[in-house]
Amino acid sequence: MRHALDITRKDDFAAWYQAVVSQADLAEESGVRGCMVIKPWGWGIWERIQRLLDDRIKETGHENCYFPLFIPLSYFAKEAEHVEGFAKEMAVVTHHRLKSENGALVVDPDAKLEEPLVVRPTSETVIGQAMGRWIQSWRDLPLKLNQWANVVRWEMRTRMFLRTSEFLWQEGHTAHATGEDAMEETLLMLEVYRSFAEDVLAIPVIAGEKPENERFPGADATYSIEAMMQDGKALQAGTSHYLGTTFSQAADISYQDDQGAQQLCHTTSWGVSTRLIGGVIMTHGDDDGLRVPPRIAPHQIIVLPMLRGKDGDGDIIAYCEEIRKTLTTQDAFREPVRVLLDQRPGKAAQKRWDWVRKGAPIIVEVGPRDMASEQVSVLRRDRLWREDGKADINGESRDDFLFNAASLLEEIQENLFTEAQTRRDEAIRTDIENMDAVAEYFAEGADKPGWIRAAWSRPTGEALDRIVEQLKALKLTLRNIPNEGGKPEAACIFTGEEAAEYIYIARAY
């Protein structure tokens, strides 16, 4: 059995990941450390994610807007805890001009800004200032905003899509009259993210609350969706924060209630980023490259005519164009099927493997014999190989394929989710009862570990700090407390006290 990539997941998962990013033509280095050029196939996946998630955000009553990339440093100075959480990652602009000196461009010392500007690491502060201006009365609430933007967090260790100095995301920001309303919003958006990850990205996730030490800087509570990658590590795929009145106090986000009294608003923020593409790679990719869930594939079906550079090529192209047109009249996931007719010169086999590496869900090949017998040769990307080691390319009648193509895409979507869910569930241990067992499970040289679901008594303060340090020594982190975990019968594995809930423990990206 041959593979399209030169390296396997088992050999070196990190190197395999980088190979997929490169050979699936998703992105490349930009020349600036930690920044990437997103290529058309990678951008097409992000466009699909953006479009489908944007629809869901708007369905919940949010409006899109845009705020500046540059934020005055004084805005951050008003919120000490928030600034401390991001201080080491902030990129700062201090000058506004260059000058030529001895044939080289240098910073002009006379062009120093009166106030330094922070390149947006997140927008709570600048949006909070706007909310303080826009909200006057209880009639202005709730205010529910979202923006699609780029942010900069100066990362020391970078990996494309997973952790970059600049990345793309959406960030929602809302203001509410009461804490109850704001918490309802926080959990609503967490559920939007959960359902989006599972229904659209085919990534099974655990939704729950982060422990105290993992809260967003300045938040009263942080919730996340956690996904398991094929190497057993956790990926935080989205977060939703209840901010209480922390930012309202700093930015004077207040309103006059219906009794005439002045009240502080309760605010939320929530977001997902291009990190989701990294999650798709590490959840669904195989040793041949990427496998893209059909709902986010820029092209769901690739039609490949087997061109020979002869007079009959025009007939094959015309035959394939009819197939393409017919497919686009069908709906999968309540949208027209997206089809590309690949007429590039070159061997069909080479082009096939190009699309295999990119992860196109269905590849259809058509040669002179197929055309003569009104057939097509179909390759499903979720089931690439037969047991005999040969590519699983099935010949079938053109009409049967056209009739079943939409349902086949939906089947592939479901298969990818089921495969990932089964793999995750089999890699979660629920029988770990103490820290010694945790250490043994994650010991050097042990079989590839997954996650631990452990009994948890919700320790805080110094007790929590000691637990975090213990786990840090094992390169482990507390992930989240599942919303639907129930109360354990066992004692907390850290304190020995009565457990209140479960918590997930894992190595993470």
Image (cartoon, rainbow, N blue to C red):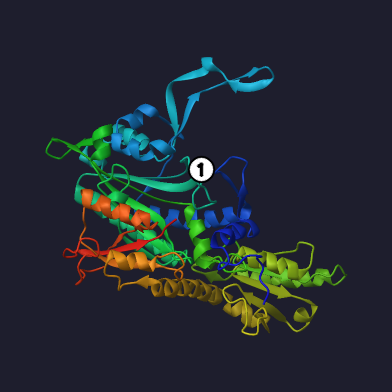
Considering every residue shown, the one lying at the far right of the view is 311
Residue 330 lies left or right of residue 343; in this view the side is left
Residue 351 lies left or right of residue 331; in this view the side is right
Q: Is residue 257 above or below residue 464?
A: above
Considering every residue shown, the one lying at the far top of the view is 110
Residue at point 45%, 75% (across, down): 418
Q: Which residue is mark 1?
A: 166
Q: Is residue 322 above or below residue 147?
A: below
Residue at point 51%, 43% (across, down): 166
| Relative depth, front residue between 460 and 294 | 460
Instruction: Report how many numbered discs are placed on residues in the image.
Output: 1
Residues packed near mark 1 inside 10 Å, few (<14), some (14 to 19) or many (20 plus): some
Q: Quadrant of the C terminus?
A: bottom left
Residue 144 visible in the picture:
no
Residue 292 visible in the picture:
yes
Residue 167 percent location from the top left of the image: 50, 46
Residue at point 54%, 70% (across, down): 331
Q: Is residue 132 above or below residue 57?
A: above
Residue 23 lies left or right of residue 498; in this view the side is right
Q: In terms of image quadrants, where is residue 114?
A: top left
Residue 433 percent location from the top left of the image: 26, 70
Task: Give SS at disc 1.
Answer: strand
| Relative depth, front residue between 187 and 335 | 187
| Relative depth, front residue between 70 and 397 | 70
Question: What amino acid type should be assigned to the residue bearing mark 1?
Answer: Glu
Residue 219 percent location from the top left of the image: 28, 45
Residue 226 percent location from the top left of the image: 38, 60
Q: Quadrant of the N terminus?
A: bottom right
